[in-house]
Image (cartoon, rainbow, N blue to C red):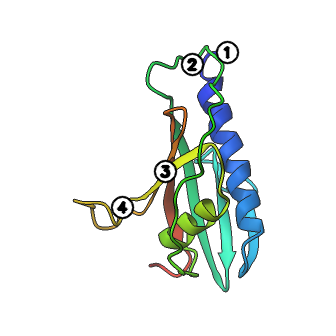
Amino acid sequence: MSETTALLRVARFTRFAVDCVKNTPGVDRVRTLEEAGDRRHPFGFAVTVGSVEVRWQVTGQLAPGEKHDQPTADVQGDPAPWVETGEQDGGEGWMADVIGRARSVKVARIERWSTREGARPGHVGLTVFLHNGARLFVRLLERGDGR
């Protein structure tokens, strides 16, 4: 199975996020990065909100003690607690709302990078902590409006 365990999780999460985004009010278009012409980043998506395209990359990290050649543990629990930010600009708060609103039983916690202690300026994205200990990273690649 080599590295397919981690890649399958990232691919699955990317499909999940695309589905969540498609069902979000105000979204005009969503495509995978590949469909948007990005060949550098194997996982992610491009979202058009209003007249702005925002591109997000998805990467992942195995759970502690998990090996690439072992199947992924399918652990479920209570969905991540989430308080809506109300942001509608396709940015970090908006993306956190999209994932949090889905109430997935696999997602334990969502952390916004820009609001955590010691946040680096320009470091925009999310860490999605899964109940099995794995993490997914949703990183802002670019915004069509330059913000």
- Which residue, given by chain and number where applicable, does mark 4 sit on? 123
Q: Mark 2: which secondary structure?
A: loop
Q: Residue at x 59, y 70 (%)?
A: 54
On the question of residue 23 being in view, the answer is: yes
Image: 110 above or below 61: below
- Which residue, given by chain and number where applicable, does mark 1 sit on? 1
- Which residue, given by chain and number where applicable, does mark 3 sit on? 109
- Which residue, given by chain and number where applicable, does mark 2 sit on? 68
Q: Earlier in the sequence, mark 1 or mark 3?
A: 1
Whether pointer 4 and pointer 2 mark residues with C-beta atoms closer than 8 Å, the reply is no
Q: Amino acid at mark 2?
A: His
- Image depth: mark 4 or mark 3 in front: 3
Image: 65 above or below 118: above
- Image depth: mark 1 or mark 3 in front: 3
Q: Is residue 99 left or right of residue 140?
A: right
> Depth check: 78 or 111 in front?
78
Q: Mark 3: which secondary structure?
A: strand
Q: Is residue 72 left or right of residue 85?
A: right
Q: Residue at x 49, y 68 (%)?
A: 92
Q: Amino acid at mark 4?
A: His
Residue 10 sits in which quadrant?
Answer: top right
Total numbered badges shown on the rendered structure: 4
In x, y percent, where is residue 43?
Answer: 63, 46
Q: CA distance from mark 2 to mark 3?
A: 23 Å
Q: Earlier in the sequence, mark 4 or mark 1?
A: 1
Image: 130 above or below 53: above
Mark 4 surroundings within 10 Å by alpha-carbon count, few (fewer than 14), some (14 through 19), many (20 or more): few
Q: Residue at x 63, y 32 (%)?
A: 7
- Image depth: mark 2 or mark 3 in front: 3
Q: CA distance from mark 4 to mark 1?
A: 33 Å
